[in-house]
Amino acid sequence: MDAVVAVRDDRSVESITLFGTMDERESTLGFRPQKEIPYNALLPYADQLDAESVYQLADIKAHLARVIQLRDIKVGGVHWCGQLAKYIRMFGLKFSKADHLTFIRLVYELVTIPELDFSLVHKFSQLLITLLKKRELIPREELVIQWRPLHKLLETVVYSPYEHLGLVLFPSNIEQVLKNLIRACRIYFPVEATQEMLDEWRPLLCPFDVKMMQGIFFLEHFLPTVVYPKEHDRSFLLWFEELIGLWQSCSNNPSWEAHLINLFSRVANDRIGFINWEPYLDRIFANILRSFHIPVGSKHVVLATSAHNTIDGIMPLCRWVAAMFGNGSHVQNYLDKLFKALESFYHPSNNGRWSIKLLKFLSGLPLAFVKRVQRERFGKKSWEPDIPVAARLTDDDITRFVNSISPVVFTAMFSKIGSTDSAAALHNLASLRPELVIPPLLEKTYPSLETLTEPHRLIACLQCCVSIARPMLSHAKHYPEGRLHIIPLLSLSLPGIDPNDIKKSLITFQLLSALASLVPIVDCSEAPQNRNDLSEVEIELCSATAQFEDFVLQFFDRAFMLVENSIHQHTRSDSAASDKMSQEEMMLEVCLLSSSISILQQCSTPIYSEALSRLYRFACDSIFEIKVAGKFTADLVRAAIKVRPEIAVKKFIPGLCEKIIQRTTSEDLSQEEHLDNEFLWNLLLLSQAVRCDGSCLVPFKEVLTKVLQLTLHLKCKDAQEWSGTLLRYLLKSLSSIYALDFRCTVTDWDLPLTEYLPIREWGKSGDLFNLGMKWHVPSKEEKAFVEHLLNTFLLTELKRTRSHCDGNSVMTREELLQCIRIVSHCLVGTGACLPHWTRFESVSLIESLVELRRYGNTASCDDDEITLEGENVRVLVSSFMRPLLAHMLLSSEDDTKTLVEIIKVYKLVMYYHGSLKDEFEGRWKNRHSIKHFMENKLQKKKTHIRALLVDRTQLQHELRTVNQAPKVFTVLHRDLFLDLHHLAVSRYMEVRKVAQGALSTGFQMFAYSYRMILDDTIKYLKDDPSIEPHQFKGALYVILGENKRSLVSKRSWEVMNKLWPALVETKHCEKPSVLKVYDEIIDRVDRNIETTELSLTVSDSAVNAAKEIWTNGSLPKPSLPSATNGELETGRAVERERNADNISAYLELVNKLVSSAESGSLGWRFHQVSLEMLTLLIRYDIRFPSSAVRLFVTNMVNSSINVRKICTAGLSAILKLQKRKHKLVEIDPYAVSGAPRPLHSNDIHPGDDRPDNRWLQYRQDGFPKDEEQWNKTVFVEKTHWGYYCWPTKMMVYAPSSEQPPLGRSFEELLDDEKPIYEAFTSKEFVDQLIKFLSLEENKGKDHFHEKNFVLFKGLFRNFDDTVLPCLAPHIERLVADTSHETHETSQRCAAEIISGLIRGSKHWTYTKVVSLWKWLMPLMKIVITNFTVESIADWGTCLATASENRDPLKISPLLELLMDNPLNGDGGSFGDSSRMYLLQGLISQQEWRLPSVLHRLYNYILIHLRHPYKAVRDRLGSTIVSLFLYDINLPNGSPTLSPRRVMFIEHILPLLEPLKDSLVAEAGRNNEAGAVAPDPQRATEGAEVPMEHAPSTEDSSEAMTMKNKENSNNSNDIDSAENSEWKSNINLCKTVLKTLQGIYTRMFQAGMPEMLKLLPVICLLESETKDPELTRECLVTLGCMSQSQMTPELILPTLETIEEVSRLNSWHARVAVLGYLQVMVFNNLFLLQSEAIASRIRRTVVNLMCDEQLEVRELSGVTLGGLLHCGYLKIDDQLMNQFKQLSSTRIKKRSRDEMVPIELMIKRHAGVIGLSACILAFPYQVPDFMPQLLMLISAHLNDPPPIQATVKKTLTSFKRTHLDSWHDHKQKFTDDQLVVLTELLVSPNYYA
């Protein structure tokens, strides 16, 4: 029976909610809410929430709209957007659709305000993502979002021209936030957007250019794919064929492939059923297989291709595969083959770099599949188009999928790192087909539970059982047997609670908790006698439930054993850490508690009572130490009482209280510092026993109060701790609201079995509509008890502090400390019910045009306030604590423990309201982790177990509790903050640290509250003798803050104006600890500072969007009217004033820092800091003040290298700012070229051979001859324009005659330019600067400095050639420097200047450009003769950088210089290879625009292919590949004008022919003894046919010896001419090999039929022993060729070539081609699926098994085994019979001296090798045919040596690979076969 049933909710928006029907909600609220949080309806105070939400919504609408109208975005806008986000978190999307749309439009306008601070973009984007998250609520036709503003935002962030210079500083995760925003928005892009995007980004798609990545990146993120079917022709159909054709064309792992795969994955998932993927399945699955980088073959070569398929890239592949199923697709067939090929790599024995990716794929694919099934069968119906019925998954599809992947999952689950991913996969697979997944898992689990020798196996099984717990019970209809396994699993897993194996214990507890939370633990064994409606399974199940009581009791016995074995042992009595539990013990405690609660809460009353009795006896009769064992026992008591307090409280609390009271009254324990364990044991148990329903504690009011009175003031610290804990938990239990019942059902389990049968509730999901929430809400009696406790203890202790301060009753330090701790315990216990104070006046922290109101949230059922003496408890505590603090600071400042406790009280008074935010977030995340493996991902719709739903409701209450205080900063807050600030600079570190933490918490809770203490903090930074070191240090820590929250990185010009100069001018301190924190502050500035806005102008569209709040007609109406015209004008005026103030503050800050730096009074450290801060203030949107520019220029020649680096970076950024704006003009490329314009923009013909783009290509004579020609020439600097297509609007720079003049006089310069001009026209300055720039920094590690290049580029760009006269002599000197000591640094410096000079001359006039090249060319000639090993890399970077983004005509002099005979021999091989390296770097930057140059260079290289030097040959090979890069066939493209590979192959094949002939001839001579190539028919002929003679093993050795002698004699006879020709041919071959390696690793399209003609030569040379280099290159080349992805047209030529090589005389060639064949087939597995192809490959391999050469036969067996193993070839009867026939070839019985006929030996050996390959093809399995095969080959164990060795090797390998699972495998053998195997596999010496 299938487990997945097609059930679909046809309600687009639920018409019935927990709050009532939607009509009722509309009547109550005045509007129809979009999506409420259902859990609010289950809160005990739910009736109060509607009024609260309506009030808040009306207020938020009014203030948010007004704040935008009044243009107060940074303060008011952020605040009210935060309030809206908080409202959504509290109430959900509880507003009308009209308001929803208005909010979206409004926030979108905020996000897209021009030049908005990116910190604000970050905040507004997150809110907009939240608003758009539930996309089913808003159809596409109701909302349109424009894409261009979002594109501009993302482009600004990802491809910013300013960020690398520090001119803009972005928030750390802004890019990811923007990507998420675009993902949420793109569904609402207009339908015309697709065409607009294609027109925008198609021109970037030049595969050879870095812009290709940018274009594909934008297409991936922006193209909309969720559209209506009628819109397909205007959406994805516009680009699908084009982009997938591009992907197929560029098959060699381009760097941008991952982006395309993400896009294809998305469109496949969004448009299921509308795209036919069948034609692309081969390529898709080949890509998936290759992405894992699986090593194949014994000589695996790791290629240096792009490793873009990271772990993050696996999930898109999974979604893609899952989306292609259905509609008759063959995806499942491909998936079967994929897992067959990968199966052994999942085995625990196989681990490598591929393992993590494989496991992520294994877990991700079922998840993606489940999501699709859920979408089709259980998803809510919304406006999104349904998947066509024909394309939906059938039940058979699901079954085949589960059957396909399950075996692999079961294999992977036992690997070292695979159990977690396997568990996730099994969870999803079991949701689909539990009957197929769970039984095999249980078959593995039960044996593991019964053995102790394989703990890893047990842990893996238990972990997987946890993941399938829910599916095992949820599918009672389809897998009823699943329920029968629950009780055996529970019972058998109990031994896993092992104190000696923590990991096993933890996973056991997890399993027990998971299973117990799903089933009522009720004995139903009598049901069959009382009911007649039970099925057979139910009858069996009812009988099994009789074991429940034994299980529960045994669980507690194991828990008691754990307690007894966990006694804490002191290792060092002086160690404070010895009293704390270890990390493992803490984890055990949590798991023990969780499991105990899970089990006990599910128990029926009889079973619970038995367990309680046993626990009571253990707790009362045992006494252990209290650190570990005591806590464990207390947790068990806590669990029992929490579950059934009405029963357990009466059992524990009276007895424990009586023992404590009796002991304290009979003995005077008040002064005892150490009490015995019995007393502490009882007190510890009591402290945990009160953590239950508070109503059950009220009857024990008097006795509990007495215990507290007797124990709170004991001198023993442990007694104080547990007594205080008792008080805290008692108050919390009485005063808090919390959920009580977490059982899996709401029914009373003690009902008669005739009325209610609990087994039918097993695994049942909770029902939100009938959740049966039971809450503890404090009753009047409980509140009275709380007030009694507070009056008795809190008020008493507070009065004691007053007496202590007054001197009436002075306490000792220990007494005072305990007094404050009691106050702290009281505040923690009652925090949830103590309201915040309201009677104090609020303090304005920052100015705003609107009120910055914050809302509290209802978190209680009534407004009854608990008071003390009629006063608010928090205010009362503050009134006592502040005088006490003042008293202590005067009299006992060294009492640090008490001061720390006072600070904790301060924190509780201000911040604590029942739960801390961090604690709440931790519980929220913990729930999500539990939900992850207990969730029904298939059905969703909150089909969680009841416990999870109750817990989520509890968390909703806690969320409201955390936010119940309005967070209004009052006068009392201010006073408390000032007290904390005083303590934050205390003399004592312990006090300072805690106070600083309290302040940081306050800064987070109350926005802008740091301003209260800012001035006081800065006061301690001044150079004042009265300020003590500890105050200075404390102030620094206050500024530093916690995490990334630091005062120094606040985005406020006011704060920075105060703080930054103070940090620079602070007093000098040499204490290491002070310097450390100071350095951390500066580092925090560098890492966390973000660009702060100077000028923020709210767009009119945002203001207009705000008006919609009042005009959309939705209720509730805004609480305030829209802004009047006068207010709007005031807002504009304030905005202008604010912007002016910001600019003024910015300039003031810069001037302050400059003044400090120039004062001369700063130490070196602070002087450097001032410069670093000034660097951070350089911005893209305002000119830097001239005084600061002068400071940077002056310090360019500072003696400190760090200062020089800072100033270099700063000056580079300044020069970018000062760049003059150059005029752009629009051109029509078709008019320029004279070519006709295409009729449609989608008519794309990429390539370099088009009439409309040939004018862009370089011409040798194209350099302009005069100024006029120069100005008429259209220079296109960007190399990507025109290759793929032209932009809609083609903009180029206007002629230089129309550009602003650069070579200006000093008077024409702006003020901020003059300091730079003065310095760089000063000989003295330039001399000093060049001296520093040419110094060595790190010996042997210095390289071309990009920042220096940017500096000089900016200089020459901004100032033309006016700065060249002072630099020219230095450049000439540096270039000519050849001294051993300085040449490296001199030439590096010269390279940096020259590259900057060439790039900076981009806009120079014709005359100056000509003069430049006239001067520069002689220098470059010197360069190409003077470079050295140390400097060549710098010069290569120089020229490549210089030619980047430059029109080739502008650098033609340099290009022609390098093209002039680079291989002239000057400088030897190094000189030749270096000149070629420089030329290669130069032409690579110009890409496709140099076809004539590339042809010239190609023809030049052809005559040097036989170069004698390796360095030159390697460089030539690399350069040739650079020439061929543009030889690519794109869809609708044309052949390139650049050199093509076919030309090269056709040229070299005739040159290599003599070499091939000589190798074949030599192989023939070596085979004269009879070793010839195999006959293709030989392997298929019968065993009776005689074979030719071939040497045996001994013959082979003798033949080899003879061969060596012949070679030696022959080599002596070869004359020098022949030797020279041989070397020349070998050199040619090495060059060709290097070229091939580059082609297969660097080119987008690697293989082509013509290149296969080189394979025979490579295979012949692969074994060349005389030249190790040649052998290595052949091996690498074969690896590259075999791993390359084939295309259909390559398949037949490849097979023909392989067959050709297999017939060559050289057995080495035949061995090489076998290795090539195995790797090639695996990497192209899905492209070679044709039966004819597979048959051809099999025939080739089998033929080679009959080869005369032993090595060929053996490797052919390995190859066949590999092909069988990966599932490419199948073992059929024909193949098996063929091997059996060959192996049965008779060898005549011979005498001792008679030789075995070699032809018979070969045939027999071939048969044995074939049989062995069939065995070894299944290393971890035993197919049905294998036992018989093992018997067959065992019969050959006594055959002659080659056969005997093969048999032994096979048997040894079989034993090794099958040993781990032999207990399973041996079931496949008969007893007789096992006897034979045992004799074969067990060593004879074993029993000796």
Image (spheres, rainbow, N blue to C red):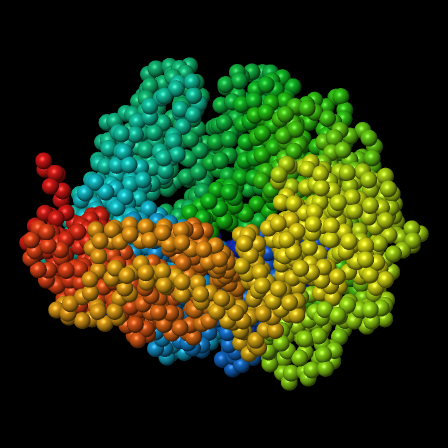
Q: Which of the pair 1006/118 is nearer the observer?
A: 118
In the rendered view, tell whether residue 577 sits above or below residue 1615: above
Give the side of residue 226 with respect to residue 502, left or right.
right
> Residue at point 77% right, 60% down?
1402
Relative to 979, does residue 505 appear above or below in the rendering?
A: below
- Position of residue 1330 in the picture relative to residue 1583 (left or right): right
User: Which percent across, then down, holds residue 714?
Assistant: 42, 20
Between residue 572 and residue 1853, name the one nearer to us: 1853
Q: Is residue 602 visible?
A: no
The residue positioned 31% from the left and 67% from the top of the image is: 1703
The image quarter in which residue 1495 lies: bottom right
Residue 649 sits in quarter: top left
* Viewer-nearest residue: 1048 or 1557: 1557
In the image: residue 1766, left or right of residue 1545:
left
- Residue at image point 62% right, 40% down: 1341
Image quarter (top left, top right, bottom left or bottom right) of the C terminus: top left
Q: Residue 1804, image x and y in percent?
A: 16, 61
Which is more toward the observer, 1719 or 1582? Answer: 1582
Quarter of the image with the N terminus is bottom left
- Residue 44 image point, x, y percent: 44, 52
The location of residue 1267, given as percent across then percent down, is: 85, 68
* Total numbered labels placed on residues in the image: 0
